[in-house]
């Protein structure tokens, strides 16, 4: 719902922006950096983000409402197809598209797919060349020129989301492309995501970080109960995997891996909730859940 504010100047700008890019391009890292707070999970694994995440950036002259989308890639798997379909849908629902490229490790197939989808929308787009801290400076100008030749971006901004390099310049570039209008959301709102979703995502992030390459993407976290009481918040969540071997990896010898995941997740959840948290995790085998459309919908994908 639009929040009308009589104090907003006539040149105030507001709009919706989709952040799209190849898997592991740094989209979630950028969103967290722009917000100044963590709402999107990150890891070294591509395809960490599965849902469109709404984040609101408030500036003196504008309000930017961001969708952080799953990485765009070609895939016939039901889970991946739904993720990519969500990213493409977000592009069509917004006023501006922010395309993110990993300048240090380009993904040509994903880039071509993004340009293909973008060309059919006719939406204004800004390009962020991420990870320039890992790029040879001599290669930057030719890279920018190459992208100018590929698509008519409104602006191209080299950045480092991880280090915060030139983020303000990127925000300025996007702000110029937004339509005039009042803010959509109140100044103290950073996201519309329910707390249960954020908790589940934090647990999933800790699983990725704790298991390295041992666990594929067939892992989902569902919060079963969330009860806030006077002295602490009690949370129970189930980690769904597809095979017994995956369950064993997550639990670890003597339950140590699951304990590590729980402790690290609890620490971040306590910071998020600003409250003491009791977190209990269960691990359940649900065969081929990532290929079952009914279960995907049940899990929120």
Image: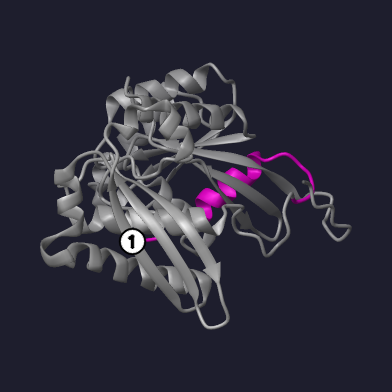
Q: Is residue 178 magenta?
A: yes
| The one of 60 and 149 positioned closer to us in this rendering | 60
Where in the figure is residue 59, as x and y percent of width and height?
65, 59
Q: Does residue 137 show up? A: yes
Q: Is residue 111 placed above or below 223 in the rendered structure?
A: above
Where is residue 227 drawn, in percent x and y?
Answer: 54, 67
Residue drawn 45% across the image and 59% down it:
199
Quadrant of the rendered image containing residue 209: bottom left
Q: According to the image, label 1 marks what residue? A: 281
When the figure is inspected, residue 105 is found, relative to residue 92, above or below; the finding is below
Give the SS element for disc 1. strand
Residue 127 makes an appearance in the image: no
Task: Please state if 77 lies on the left or on the right of 65 as rendered.
Answer: left
- Nearer-the-camera pick, 243 or 274: 243
Mark 1 packing: few (<14 Cα in 10 Å), some, or many (20+)?
A: some
Magenta segment, which residues?
A: 162-183
Q: Work out which residue is located at the far right of the displayed protein and give it.
A: 6
**Number of numbered markers:** 1
The residue depicted at 58 percent of the width and 40 percent of the height is 17
């Amino acid at each position: 719902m639009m929040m009308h504010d009589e104090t907003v100047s006539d040149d105030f700008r507001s709009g919706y922006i989709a952040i799209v890019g190849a898997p592991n391009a740094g989209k979630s890292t950028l969103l967290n950096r722009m917000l100044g707070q963590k709402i999107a999970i990150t890891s070294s694994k591509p395809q960490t983000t599965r849902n469109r995440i709404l984040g609101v950036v408030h500036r003196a002259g504008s309000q930017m409402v961001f969708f952080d989308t799953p990485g765009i890639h070609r895939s016939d798997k039901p889970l991946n197809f739904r993720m990519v379909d969500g990213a493409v849908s977000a592009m069509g629902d917004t006023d501006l598209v922010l395309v993110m490229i990993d300048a240090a490790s380009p993904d040509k197939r994903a880039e071509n797919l993004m340009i293909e989808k973008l060309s059919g929308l006719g939406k204004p787009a800004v390009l962020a060349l991420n990870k320039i801290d890992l790029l040879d400076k001599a290669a930057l100008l030719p890279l920018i020129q190459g992208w100018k030749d590929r698509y008519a971006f409104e602006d191209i901004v080299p950045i480092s989301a991880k280090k915060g390099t030139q983020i303000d310049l990127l925000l300025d570039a996007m702000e110029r492309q937004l339509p005039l209008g009042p803010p959509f959301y109140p100044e103290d709102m950073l996201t519309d995501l329910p707390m249960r979703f954020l908790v589940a995502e934090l647990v999933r992030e800790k699983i990725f970080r704790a298991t390295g390459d041992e666990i594929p993407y067939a892992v989902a976290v569902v919060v079963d109960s969330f009860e806030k009481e006077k002295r602490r918040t009690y949370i129970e969540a189930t980690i769904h995997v597809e095979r017994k071997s995956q369950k064993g990896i997550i639990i670890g010898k003597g339950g140590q891996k699951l304990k590590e995941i729980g402790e690290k997740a609890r620490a971040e959840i306590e910071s998020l909730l600003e409250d003491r948290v009791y977190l209990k995790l269960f691990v359940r085998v649900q065969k081929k859940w990532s290929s079952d459309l009914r279960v995907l919908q049940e899990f929120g994908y």
